[in-house]
Each structure stands twice: as structure tokens, then as C-alpha cells.
Image: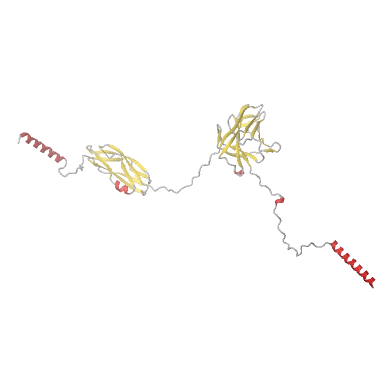
């Protein structure tokens, strides 16, 4: 045998002996149970609470605790047992050289029972963990699913502008504004001469006055007139505002009401509506405040109001028709008499007939007596 072959065999033998000594000889575990180092698993929280049907995330970090860095695998040691109880676990990152991070996802099924559970995470491989990382999971009792009645919020009253007529008022001269209502009837507002618009301490001698009508939505009759029908809304505006901040006054600041005419029967009335907001051609919100007083002129067929001193909204209401009264001719027939009927339906003879009969009998007797005397 040549020297080169002998040298090669000797070298191979030496390297094999070193490898045998380092890794524990024949039959040693292929997972390197003794490892090269140790790892520690750190959780960003030690407890977790959830209800059945919910999921949550918990962050973890795998760090080298001792020795040299080598490939390390982590897992949930009791994942199978937890799964049987309706608790699922999954790891976003299960293998790398420490240090590395990941996320543990915990899911409780709808069938998971309330109680406390322990989730155990361990590291294996060349840098195993010396102790598992524990997460205490609390499954809370399912919320009471009994239904509760939730009242729907009442619909907001709304007014949509139908028609408007705006005039510029010179306080010393006054003015008149007429506008059509949704039913085709016209309404007229008369601003008497000498009528100013007061706001705070300011009295305006010139201002824009508008008379407008509105269709309604979600507006019902007030409780005291619950049987009335809502017709529509109408309003005064000063400088494009419907607000109680303005008041119509004379030059001395004393209230000066306008005169309003409407061609409606006396069954119509109106209520002041306050608290809403005008936005362009839409007026929303508010509620009834006070009923207005109108007078009816049967000659002209007009309703007249002389109370309005502020530019606000009003709602026209229509009273229900009065019940018709039954005439005497259609009254209930009188009850039949309870007196027993007489046996004969013939009327009783009068005294005159009785006397006449007696006289005839007397005459017959006298004639008969005279006849018998002559015969003798």
C-alpha cells in the first residue's frame, strides 16, 4: 500500500473520531437534544380575555438565553387539547435564528365554554427553551342575547318651500305681499305704514319682507286638536330669516302687528310653530307653540288675523266636519200605545143623533095613538 493511501486513511479516521466525539457517538438524537444554546419566549402580555366567537392577537419574541445562535422552532405545546375545547391557535413565525418575532392568533369558537385556559408555547431545536411561555386565556360568558325593544327616533318635522313673494319695505310706507298656497288659495300679508323691524337694540327702517308657503312632512296635529287635519305651513321672513329675534314695531319700538288674510272657511285655524331652522328653501325641526286667533267675515269669505308681530312659521289646521243633526220629520216613530183596543171599531154615537132618534120614536107613538082613536 502506498504512503498516500495510508495518509488518507489516517486523516479520515481522525476526522471521524472528532465528529463522533462532538455529536455523542452512534445512536444520538438527530434533533441535537443537548442543543447548542437555550432560548426564551417572551409574550407582550400574560393574560387574554374574549367571548365565544371572538379572536385576538398576542405578539411574541424568541431570544437567545445562552450559548450560540442556531435554528430554533417554536410551537403551542397543548394546541391539540385546546382545539378539542373550541380554542384555536396559530403562529405567524415558527422557525428562525433567535432573535425573531411573530404573532400568536387565538380564536374562541361559538361553542367554547366560559372558563380559564392555559396556552403553553415552547421552543425546540438547537436552542430549546428551558421553560415554556404561558398565556392565561379567559373565555367570558356569552352576552345575554335577549332582544330589547329600541324605540325609533321620531321623524324630524320638515317644511319644503312651495311659493315665496319678497318685497322691500320702507317702514314709513309699509307694503303688501301675496303668495299662493299649495291648495291654490292666496294669502296676503299687509304691513301697515309706520311698521319697522326691530332686532335687539336696532330698529330697521328698510328691510326685506317675504311671505312664503310650505308643504309639510312628519307634521301632525297638536294633541289639543288631535282630530284636525294638517293643511300646510306659511311664514313671514325678515331679511331671509324666520326667527323670533325680529319684532314688528312702530317708530317708538311698540309692537305693531301685521294683518293677514286668507280665503278659508271658519273651520280653519292655525298654530305658531317655533324652534325650527331655515336653510334656503327647507325648514326643519321645531314644534307647536300657541294657537292663533282668526276672525271670519261671512260677507267676504276671508279669515283675518291681526296678532302676528314676529317672522315665524305657522301651520294651518282644518277642523273635522260637525256631525249632522236629524230633522223632526225623520225622528224615531213613537212607541205604540199599550192600551188594549176596544171590541168594536165603530165610533160612539154623538148626543145629537141620540136626541133625533128619541124624537122620531115619540112622533111615531103619537101618530099610532091618533089612528087607534079614530078607528073606535
**Viewed as shown, does residue 309 lie left or right of 118?**
right
Say which quadrant the N terminus sits in.
Answer: top left
Image spot of residue 204 (x, y percent): 62, 27
Image spot of residue 52 (x, y percent): 37, 46
- Rendered view: 172 above or below 350: above
Q: Which of the 4 image quarters holds residue 164?
A: top right
- Rendered view: 115 above or below 342: above
Image spot of residue 194 (x, y percent): 67, 28
Towards the viewer: 20 or 299: 299
- The residue at the point 36 percent across, 43 percent down is 55
**Viewed as shown, does residue 57 lie left or right of 374?**
left
Q: Which of the 4 image quarters holds residue 355?
A: bottom right
Most distant residue in the bottom direction:
376
Most distant residue in the front direction:
375
Towards the viewer: 366 or 173: 366
Say which quadrant the C terminus sits in.
Answer: bottom right
Towards the viewer: 364 or 138: 364
- Rendered view: 293 above or below 359: above
Q: Can residue 41 be seen by looking at this rendering?
A: yes
- The residue at the point 91 percent across, 67 percent down is 367
Amino acid at each position: 500500500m502506498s504512503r498516500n493511501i495510508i495518509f488518507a486513511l489516517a486523516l479520515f479516521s481522525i476526522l471521524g473520531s472528532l465528529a463522533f466525539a462532538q455529536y455523542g457517538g452512534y445512536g444520538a438524537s438527530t434533533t441535537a437534544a443537548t442543543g447548542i444554546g437555550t432560548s426564551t419566549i417572551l409574550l407582550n402580555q400574560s393574560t387574554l380575555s374574549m367571548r365565544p366567537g371572538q379572536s385576538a392577537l398576542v405578539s411574541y419574541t424568541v431570544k437567545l438565553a445562552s450559548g450560540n445562535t442556531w435554528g430554533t422552532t417554536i410551537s403551542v405545546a397543548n394546541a391539540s387539547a385546546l382545539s378539542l375545547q373550541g380554542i384555536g391557535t396559530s403562529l405567524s413565525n415558527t422557525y428562525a435564528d433567535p432573535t425573531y418575532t411573530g404573532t400568536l392568533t387565538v380564536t374562541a369558537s361559538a361553542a367554547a365554554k366560559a372558563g380559564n385556559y392555559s396556552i403553553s408555547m415552547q421552543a425546540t431545536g438547537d436552542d430549546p427553551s428551558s421553560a415554556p411561555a404561558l398565556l392565561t386565556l379567559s373565555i367570558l360568558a356569552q352576552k345575554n342575547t335577549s332582544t330589547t325593544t329600541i324605540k325609533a327616533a321620531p321623524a324630524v318635522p320638515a317644511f319644503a318651500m312651495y311659493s315665496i313673494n319678497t318685497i322691500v319695505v320702507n317702514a314709513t310706507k309699509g307694503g303688501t305681499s301675496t303668495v299662493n298656497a299649495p291648495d291654490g288659495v292666496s294669502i296676503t300679508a299687509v304691513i301697515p305704514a309706520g311698521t319697522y323691524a326691530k332686532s335687539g337694540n336696532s330698529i330697521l327702517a328698510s328691510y326685506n319682507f317675504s311671505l312664503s308657503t310650505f308643504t309639510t312632512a312628519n307634521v301632525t296635529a297638536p294633541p289639543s286638536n288631535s282630530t284636525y287635519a294638517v293643511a300646510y305651513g306659511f311664514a313671514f321672513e325678515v331679511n331671509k330669516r324666520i326667527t323670533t329675534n325680529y319684532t314688528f314695531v312702530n317708530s317708538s319700538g311698540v309692537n305693531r302687528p301685521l294683518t293677514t288674510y286668507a280665503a278659508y272657511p271658519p273651520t280653519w285655524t292655525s298654530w305658531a310653530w317655533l324652534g325650527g331652522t331655515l336653510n334656503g328653501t327647507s325648514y326643519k325641526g321645531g314644534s307647536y307653540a300657541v294657537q292663533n286667533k282668526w276672525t271670519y267675515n261671512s260677507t267676504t269669505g276671508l279669515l283675518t288675523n291681526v296678532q302676528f308681530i314676529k317672522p315665524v312659521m305657522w301651520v294651518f289646521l282644518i277642523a273635522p266636519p260637525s256631525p249632522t243633526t236629524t230633522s223632526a220629520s225623520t225622528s224615531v216613530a213613537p212607541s205604540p200605545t199599550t192600551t188594549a183596543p176596544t171590541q168594536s171599531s165603530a165610533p160612539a154615537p154623538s148626543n145629537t143623533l141620540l136626541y133625533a132618534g128619541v124624537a122620531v120614536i115619540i112622533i111615531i107613538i103619537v101618530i099610532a095613538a091618533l089612528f087607534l082613536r079614530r078607528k073606535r
